[in-house]
Amino acid sequence: MLAAPARSARPYPARNAPADRLSATERVEAARLMRVNHSGEIAAQALYRGQALWARKPRIAQALRQAATEEMDHLAWCEERLGELGGRPSVLAPVWYGGSFLIGWLAGAAGDAASLGFVTETERQVESHLEGSMQRLPVSDRRSRSVLAAMAADEAAHGTNAEALGGKPLPTLIKTAMKWTARIMTRTSFWL
């Protein structure tokens, strides 16, 4: 886990959602899914911070820093929901952060167009992942669903913004490598 609890600049999306009536089994499943999403948010804000270091244009650096800030909101929301469910973050959180920061740094070093293309593809894959998480959550888990829905809206905006700023499509090989890396992280985080 990170050194201190994540803090959100925006309100918790589940603040007005009704309390859940989850069975013990549903609660464990929901906590595991939220742990995976928490891990993804650790990775996302690290990616964008790493990429921002190489941004050539100030408006691109600012867009990456803003995306990282919003990913920190998501991290705080997932952390809060994990606590409500009696779950815990992944024990591999430092690995997810360090590895993602390095990947972001490398993506940023490839230039603004490639870096922004990386953001666009990352967010496309994250949107797909969030949709899958919502399908797997217990139907009665409205609190987790409200968190994931708010996150999905931000992720779509990040991808659209990166494309509008000049992001170029990535080669298929890189997209495939990203998908496999994410699959390893999500499957590992589900259990650890």
Image: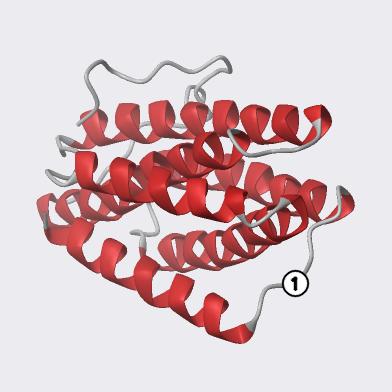
**Which quadrant, please, contains the N terminus?**
top left
Q: Position of residue 79 (x, y in %)?
A: 31, 30
With respect to residue 156, does 186 lie above or below?
A: below
Residue 191 is left or right of residue 85, and the answer is left
Q: Is residue 191 above or below residue 132?
A: above
Q: Please provide percent x and percent y for residue 47.
A: 49, 45
The residue identified by callout 1 is 169
Query: Residue 141: in sight, yes or no?
Result: no
On screen, residue 166 versus residue 64, left or right, reads: right
Observer-nearest of 98 and 89: 98
Task: Identify the residue at horizontal 24%, vertical 68% (top origin).
Answer: 187
Colour setup of the view = secondary structure
Marker count (numbered): 1
For residue 110, above or below residue 96: below
Q: Which residue is drawn at 54% across and 84% down?
A: 173
Q: Which amino acid does label 1 sit on?
A: Pro
| Quarter in which the C terminus is drawn | bottom left
